[in-house]
Image: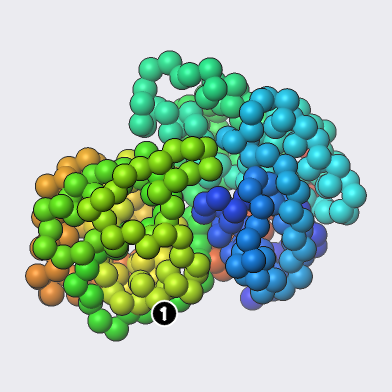
Amino acid sequence: MRRVSAAPRHLLMTADAVGGVWTHALELAAALAPLGVRTTLAVLGPGLDAARRARAAQVPGLELVDTGLPLDWLAGTEAEVIQAGEAIASLARCSGAELLQLNSPALAAAADFPVPLVGVCHSCLATWWQTMRGGPMPSDFAWRVGLLARGYMRCDALVAPSAAFAAATARAYRLQRAPEVVWNGRRPGRVATAAGRFAFTAGRLWDDGKDLGTLNRAAAQLDLPVFAAGSTRGPNGAAVDLRHLRLLGSLDDAALEGWLARGPVFVSTARYEPFGLAVLEAAQAGCALVLSDIPSFRELWDGAACFVEPGDVGGFAKAIATLSRDQEQRRSLRVAALRRSRRYTATAMAQGMARIHARLQAAPRGRSVAA
């Protein structure tokens, strides 16, 4: 793998173990290692379990720091987030890192950092609220959005995992320039050799943005099982009742790969999804995809998935049932998804991020991302 000129030798990156950011961080750190980049991963939020620690130990040169600091969207007060940002700034000074990637850019709102900052816009409350609710935000959301806006303004570069989400972020925060786009990536696992007669989904089942209620109601209309991997209760207290789905609980990477290798019809009914790592994992396994027709999914999977209008219970049930019977259409979609997934590799993601890292290393600091 070609080394990107002037890339930092030591990257400090923040992450959490609640959702896709954890996967993104480990995949990126592993793919940056052959480029000569050593990563220190500062983990915020709920503590790491043994499985996640074991997974992190497989990444060459990765140093794991379980900070115990609060996540911006779980913190009780603005002061907690500001203090967490100051702690990360102190870690940047002590660690000797040459660049900091904030996967929670709100941490940049008030602290002074000794190195260039890359803020990655994985998701946010403002864009979630505009998609899922609309109207004035509650005060508990408003102060978090304000902190994130300040954090965005203090980053030296912003990155989003899809052009659709970059545009949504620019609109929500009135940025003069949209974040740069670096698609998320994964190393592929096993490819399915058969087409299982069942449907499958995975992710944060408790999150309204994933709209599992639609899939739950669609499952009640089907004569085949619909399995769902993930937690039905979130760390913020959110919970969902999915009585028509066959719930598997949270699965580790190996177990999830095993389910996808059985070749189910993979379904995402999400109304809000900046990228969708679970969709990518299913496509890499050669699963046929049934996806909600939202901008990010269209950008990433147009021509390689069956699209259904968000919230259309009957439409999802019909698409799943059709693919369970029509083996030729299903085979065509499986091949198309597998081919498309080759755009979204961990190597491509690392090279894209490394180019941004190298540019910031070479440039003077202090220019606002919105200038």
SS for callout 1: loop
Q: Residue at x 43, y 52 (%)?
A: 231
Q: In the image shown, does 236 or 172 lie closer to the viewer?
A: 236
Residue 239 picture quarter: top left
Residue 315 x, y percent position in the rendering: 13, 49
Is residue 119 left or right of 361 when viewed as pictured? Answer: left
Image side of residue 359 versus residue 176, left or right: right
Q: Is residue 215 visible?
A: no
Establish if 218 lies above or below 263: above
Residue 115 image position (x, y, % from top left): 81, 44
Residue at horizontal 42 percent and vertical 56 percent from the top: 230
Residue type highlighted by circle 1: Arg
Residue located farthest toward the bottom when viewing the structure as drawn: 193
Residue 97: image location, x then y, percent: 83, 54
Q: Quadrant of the N terminus?
A: bottom right
Name the residue beneath numbered marker 1: 190
Q: Is residue 197 above or below residue 292?
A: below
Q: Nearer the viewer, residue 190 or 208?
A: 208
At horizontal 48% and vertical 28% (from top left) the residue drawn is 126
